[in-house]
Amino acid sequence: MKVFLTFLLVLVSLVSYVIVSTKLGIFQRYPVVHFVIAGIGVVILLRLMFQHFTLWRLLAVAASAALVGFFAWWTLIYSTYTFTETSVNAGKQLNDGLSNIALKTAGGADFYFGEEIAKQPMTLLVFYRGIW
């Protein structure tokens, strides 16, 4: 029962981050609390496995370590956004050097700032995150 509850602790710590970030809109670039709780769960599982080795305990440790590894990859590498040299700060106007930036539209087509500004000099670009 201890093994199941500890594995559940690891799982709940990771799922809670997804719920907090998507449903409540609280994004954490480095979800330290969730990492700590999941890490504590993995350590407890390792300790339980070394006290009395069983196949189920080994599987619980392997599954929880794989979950934590996937969560670390997802939050620290896959979901992070890097700032490029051509980033535009909020409230700044777009200059000529930045007019060749291409973005993907929701339909997958390329969107070029320069082309849109040539059509309409007073162009407002709104970024909408949407839901995943």
Image (spheres, helix red, strand yellow):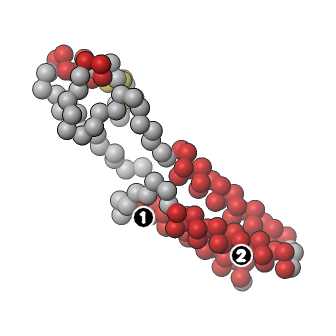
Is 104 drawn above or below residue 19 in the view shown?
above
Q: Picture coordinates of residue 62 (x, y %)? A: 75, 62
Dots 2 and 1: beta carbons under 8 Å?
no
Foreground: 30 or 8? 30
Foreground: 75 or 54? 75
Residue sitting at x 84%, y 75% = 50
User: In the picture provided, is 116 more to the left or to the right than 79?
Assistant: left
Disc number at residue 44? Answer: 2
Dot 2 crowding, Cα within 10 Å, few <14, some 14–19, many 20+: some
> Which quadrant does the N terminus fall into?
bottom right
Q: State the SS at label 2.
A: helix
Q: Quadrant of residue 101?
A: top left
Q: Nearer the viewer, mark 2 or mark 1?
A: 2
Question: In the rendered image, which residue does mark 1 sit on?
Answer: 20
Q: State the SS at label 1.
A: helix
Foreground: 129 or 73? 73
Task: Give the amino acid at mark 2.
Answer: Ile
Q: Picture coordinates of residue 45 (x, y %)? A: 74, 73
Residue sitting at x 53%, y 44% = 78
